[in-house]
């Protein structure tokens, strides 16, 4: 297998300026006491409002129908005869799980860049209309599986500039994440926050997003391609994650599900080479987290098939995903992006579909 057609370097540069202002009024001793009390009350009120915005009231979900779950997992195997699918001895999810009851169809990208994916390439309303069209295409191709739309947003972007801390990554401002959440709400979509750590690491980046991951509709993606553990600049070679890194993330998400009484989180792990994910056999599964290995390579159909066969189908974890590129899949003959009907011939069937 050759992968020179698959690697896409990240190349966007950003700067951010934060302005803070504060006004203080002089007060008498009695006023200070009253003012302190008022400030405490205001702080408590603000904290309560923030919590209300971030952490929704607990929702009760019906118990998982295990018989239905098993039948759907068998259906996803799509007649696979290797004995690897469906994956044996995986835990049943907690109530409220999305997979395998629905297929997720996601648009990927960043609002700052038209070159990183369809999410940022089109004006928001046009993008949402196109997503709606793809949802209909998948629903038509597989009428038995409801489709859940999603926006897969790159919240931490690997870049060509080292930045002040030399980590070669840029964290998106929260106001942009808020914009994505608003767009998703209009489309009845869930949201994935994706992280490209570059010379940082997943343990430093993931906790910074907790206030969003505490929301039931927000899920997570981790991209080994830009995890540069050897100190290389991102985009020059393909990075890597080990099972230990993935287990850290799934353990962290598990703790959030328990802490905030959430339905299971979906964890997307991108992959298109063997070394992108090492020791996959040691990845731990939890009822609180649904893990998807997403086939992230671009290229002609035969190249994508090889990547799928060796690194997704051949190294099973739990669920599978498949990425489609509106432009890069067309670069080489036969200049064809796979249709939903063609993707559904894969063994096993992908339950997560991503468009870039």
Image (cartoon, helix red, strand yellow):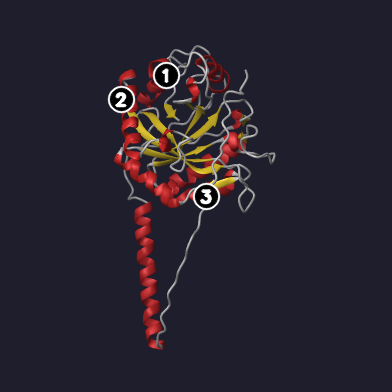
- Pick the quarter of the image with the N terminus: top right
- Pick the quarter of the image with the C terminus: top left
- Of the image marks 2 and 1, the number of the one nearer the N terminus: 1
* Picture residue at 44% right of the left edge, 71% below the top: 22
Q: Is residue 86 left or right of residue 46?
A: right
Residue nearest the viewer, comparing 254 with 88: 254
Q: Is residue 177 above or below residue 1?
A: below
- Of the image marks 1 and 3, the number of the one nearer the N terminus: 1
Which mark is in front, 2 or 1? 2
**3D distance between C-alphas at marks 2 and 1:** 24 Å
Which SS class for mark 2?
helix
Residue underneath mark 1: 74
* Picture residue at 37% right of the left edge, 45% below the top: 181
**3D distance between C-alphas at marks 3 and 2:** 35 Å
* Picture residue at 42% right of the left edge, 20% below the top: 76
Look at the numbered discs 3 and 2 and tell me whether their residues touch, using CB distance below 8 Å.
no
**3D distance between C-alphas at marks 1 and 3:** 35 Å
Coordinates of residue 149 in the picture (x, y in percent): 35, 33
Coordinates of residue 57 in the picture (x, y in percent): 32, 50
Residue nearest the viewer, comparing 105 with 14: 14
- Of the image marks 3 and 2, the number of the one nearer the N terminus: 2
Residue underneath mark 3: 207
Residue nearest the viewer, comparing 216 with 122: 122
* Picture residue at 69% right of the left edge, 41% below the top: 231
Which SS class for mark 3?
helix
Residue underneath mark 2: 136
Residue nearest the viewer, comparing 134 with 51: 134
Q: Residues within 10 Å of mark 1 (few under 14, many from 20)?
A: some
């Amino acid at each position: 297998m050759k992968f020179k057609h698959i690697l896409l370097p990240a190349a966007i540069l950003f700067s951010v300026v934060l302005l803070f202002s504060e006004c203080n009024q002089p007060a008498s001793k009695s006023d200070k006491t009253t003012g302190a009390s008022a400030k405490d009350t205001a702080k408590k009120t603000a904290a309560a409002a923030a919590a209300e915005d971030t952490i929704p009231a607990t929702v009760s979900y019906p118990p998982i129908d295990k018989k239905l779950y098993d039948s759907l997992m068998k259906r996803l195997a799509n007649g696979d005869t290797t004995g690897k699918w469906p994956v044996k001895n995986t835990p049943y999810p907690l109530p409220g799980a999305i997979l395998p009851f629905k297929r997720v169809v996601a648009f990927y990208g960043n609002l700052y860049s038209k070159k990183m994916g369809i999410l940022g390439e089109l004006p928001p309303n046009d993008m949402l209309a196109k997503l709606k069209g793809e949802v209909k295409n998948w629903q038509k191709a597989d009428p038995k599986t409801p489709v859940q739309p999603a926006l897969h947003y790159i919240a931490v972007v690997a870049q060509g500039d080292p930045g002040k801390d030399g980590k070669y990554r840029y964290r998106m401002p929260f106001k942009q994440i808020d914009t994505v959440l608003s767009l998703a709400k209009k489309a009845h979509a869930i949201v994935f926050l994706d992280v490209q750590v570059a010379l940082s690491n997943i343990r430093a980046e993931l906790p910074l997003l907790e206030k969003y991951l505490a929301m039931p509709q927000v899920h997570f993606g981790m991209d080994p391609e830009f995890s540069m553990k050897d100190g290389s600049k991102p985009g020059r070679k393909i990075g890597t994650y080990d099972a230990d890194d993935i287990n850290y993330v799934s353990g962290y998400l598990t703790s959030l599900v328990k802490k905030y009484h959430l339905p299971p989180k979906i964890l997307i792990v991108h992959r298109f080479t063997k070394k992108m994910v090492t020791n996959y056999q040691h990845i731990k599964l939890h009822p609180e987290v649904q893990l998807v290995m997403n086939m992230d390579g671009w290229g002609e159909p035969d190249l994508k098939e090889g990547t799928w066969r060796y690194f997704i189908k051949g190294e099973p974890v739990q669920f599978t995903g498949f990425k489609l590129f509106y432009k890069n899949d067309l670069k080489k003959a036969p200049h064809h992006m796979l249709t939903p009907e063609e993707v559904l011939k894969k063994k096993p069937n992908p339950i997560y579909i991503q468009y870039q």
